[in-house]
Image (spheres, grey):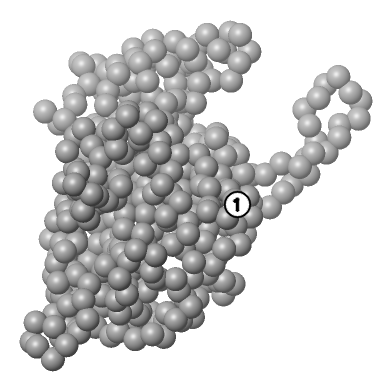
Amino acid sequence: MGDLRIEVEFLTGRCAAADPFHRETAEWPPSPARLFAALAAAAFETGDEEGLTALRWLELQLAPSVHVGGETRRLNGRGETPQHFVPVNDTRSDQRKRVARVFPSVTLSHPVAQFLWRDIEPPKGQKQALARLTTLVPYLGESASVVRVSLTEQESELPAYEPVARGEVFLRVPFGGQLDEMSRNYALGLNPPAGVQHAYRFRRDTAGQRAMTISPASRRDVFIFRLGGRPSHSVTHGLHFTAAVRQSLVALADKLTKEVPPVLHGHNPDGGRLRQDHVVVAPLPFVLGTRADARVLGFMIILPPDLSESDRQICYRAIEALEVVRLAGGNEFGALRCHATEPTRTLRADCWSGPARVWITATPAVLNRFPGKRPDKTLERIVASMCKHIGLPAPASLTFRPESFHRGVPHARHFLTKRPHWRPLPHGHLRLEFAEPVRGPLVIGSCRHYGLGLMLPLAEDTV
């Protein structure tokens, strides 16, 4: 059985399409539901009954992978979409007032995207109908987003967003009955259905790169949240945020299921400290760019890879219900789940995932024991054991010091690295260099479950 591949080339090198849930940001990567809607428009406009039948078959298939390149910049280069004042389409008035509108778009590093449905074969005659419809699609998104669409047999070398049960981003996909619902909405003068959201995971490496990229032993579920309001707390006191998030997750799990797995609260049934890996909550500070001020913009939740299915489902439910972070002093912030079109670089998974050979700490790493003169207590052996604990090889070289390795990251002495019941341990900033690229996100060392030891990948041209 073959694969179904639909290729979309953005002829201007730009994609102009607004996210239907966040109208001021561009939707990138383009969602499968957007492509489906464009094909449906072509079928309805031409009265192509074979095409409509093919689309009814396509809407019942599993979500496709989306192979895309990255975006080089948003419209004005700062992740912001400028406003334009345009006349409204109001035929009831002789005076057409101008109102503010935005037309978000992105410049693409690679102009071709590919949608891949693996191991499916369209029924006889329907593949030709789909091929016919693709040639009739003039644009994807705004009319300024001119495209060439076609069926192809060529396998894409670009990295992919792959559909998963749980992932860090969401894309809209078609659903069974969507074509008929589009027809009904059109007759009623309503907007077409946007599609349903499906979880996706970004796989940056291509097949050629995969063999030489080292990653932790198992893939972890990663969830990123933005703090609502105007957060002004420095990452130096990020422990306050991460402790509050962990407490909220425990409370939500108890409320929803009456059962809190040890990976959430971090204790054995006998009250002792849990020895196995448990849920990591890390603050996400604004440390990149010329205006970086180390404010906590959001946080990242990472589930351990070896969770039982029952514990995983409890964690999922608690994370999905998380809406507010309440700090001990009384301040509270909304917790807003970030999606694929998140314009703030700090709050995108690719900012923290690499792959890269060189990594530096954005929050100080806490060693799991004091260095000593014995061979098994050297700094190198301690750091190697910390790397091994999260499934990584020993680094080829390392540097451990109190000063940060990035101008946006504060000195280690300014960080709160201890809670009342924790014993004091050495802490400082780490720079790790591996022989081969390593995939993140990486949070290393003792106290990592509260976000200490969060590491930032460095691009090769900055090393």
Image-quadrant location for residue 418: bottom left
- Closer to us: 155 or 131: 155
- Closer to us: 317 or 416: 416
Image-quadrant location for residue 43: top left
Residue 132 percent across, percent down from the top left:
36, 25
Task: Judge the density around disc 1: few (<14), some (14-19), many (≥20) Cα neighbours within 10 Å.
Answer: few
Residue 316 percent across, percent down from the top left:
32, 36
Q: Residue at x 23, y 49 (%)?
A: 271
Q: Residue at x 43, y 43 (%)?
A: 248
Which residue in the protein does label 1 denote? 331
* 12 with respect to 356 (left or right): right
Image-quadrant location for residue 56: top left
Q: Residue at x 37, y 28 (%)?
A: 256
Element class at badge 1: loop
* 216 with respect to 93 (left or right): left
Q: In which quadrant is the N terminus drawn?
A: top left
Query: Three-letter amino acid code at disc 1?
Result: Asn
Determine the residue located farthest toward the bottom in the rendered image. Answer: 373
> As displayed, is residue 367 above or below residue 178?
below
Q: Is residue 32 visible?
A: no
> As displayed, is residue 349 above or below residue 190?
below
Determine the residue located farthest toward the right in the rendered image. Answer: 94
> As displayed, is residue 331 above or below residue 249?
below
